[in-house]
Image (spheres, rainbow, N blue to C red):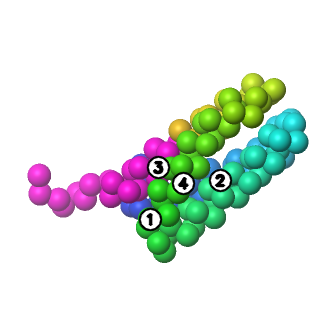
Amino acid sequence: MLKNKIDGRVLNACLGGWLFASALLLSRSNGELANNLLLGFSVFLVAFMAMAVHRFSRLNTLLGCWAIASPFALGYRDRLAGINDIAVGVLVIAVSIWVRRGGAPSRHAVA
């Protein structure tokens, strides 16, 4: 379980790295390749920038939305690549929202 906001941002950086790597690993058209290279690098970069400026996590939420929409908007031919982008997009959004809401509650918090 993620314990703090930094864990969430590191997870989003890893998800961005996976999007970047999956662009090279999965067979894609040039549009799919370019989209995932740029999207993966952007999620990775924004996650690290959000460690210093917390508002950047909102940008990762938008990038996650694009990851979900891109297989439909760009007409991906490879079903596996589309499923990968949708799954990563959902995870990026979930982690970004979780980080913005303050992460896991403290064990010492008074209910």
Q: Amino acid at mark 1?
A: Arg
Q: Earlier in the sequence, mark 2 or mark 4?
A: 2
Q: Earlier in the sequence, mark 1 or mark 3?
A: 1
* Label pair 2/4, CB-CB below 8 angstroms: no
As drawn, 18 above or below 106: above
- Apparent side of residue 57 relative to residue 4 in the rendered image (left or right): right
Place residue 69 in its image quadrant. top right
Which three-letter amino acid code belongs to the residue tagged 4? Asn
Q: How many other residues sit within 10 Å of disc 2, few (<14), some (14-19) or many (≥20)?
A: many
Looking at the rendered image, the disc whose residue lies closer to the viewer, 2 or 1, is 1
Q: Give yes or no for contact between labels 4 and 3 (Cβ–Cβ under 8 Å).
A: yes
Indicate the secondary structure of the residue bearing disc 3: helix
Q: Earlier in the sequence, mark 3 or mark 2?
A: 2
* Three-letter amino acid code at the position of disc 3: Val
Front position among marks 1 and 3: 1
Q: Residues within 10 Å of mark 1 (few under 14, many from 20)?
A: few
Determine the CA span between mark 4 and mark 3: 9 Å
Left or right, residue 14 beside residue 56? right
Q: Earlier in the sequence, mark 4 or mark 3?
A: 4
Q: Residue 40: x percent and y percent?
A: 69, 52
Can you identify the residue that label 1 sits on?
55
Residue ID at (47%, 49%)? 95
Residue occupying image coordinates x 70% and y 47%: 19
Name the amino acid, label 2.
Gly
Q: CA distance from mark 1 to mark 3?
A: 14 Å
Q: Which residue is mark 3?
A: 95
| Residue 108 on the magenta segment | yes
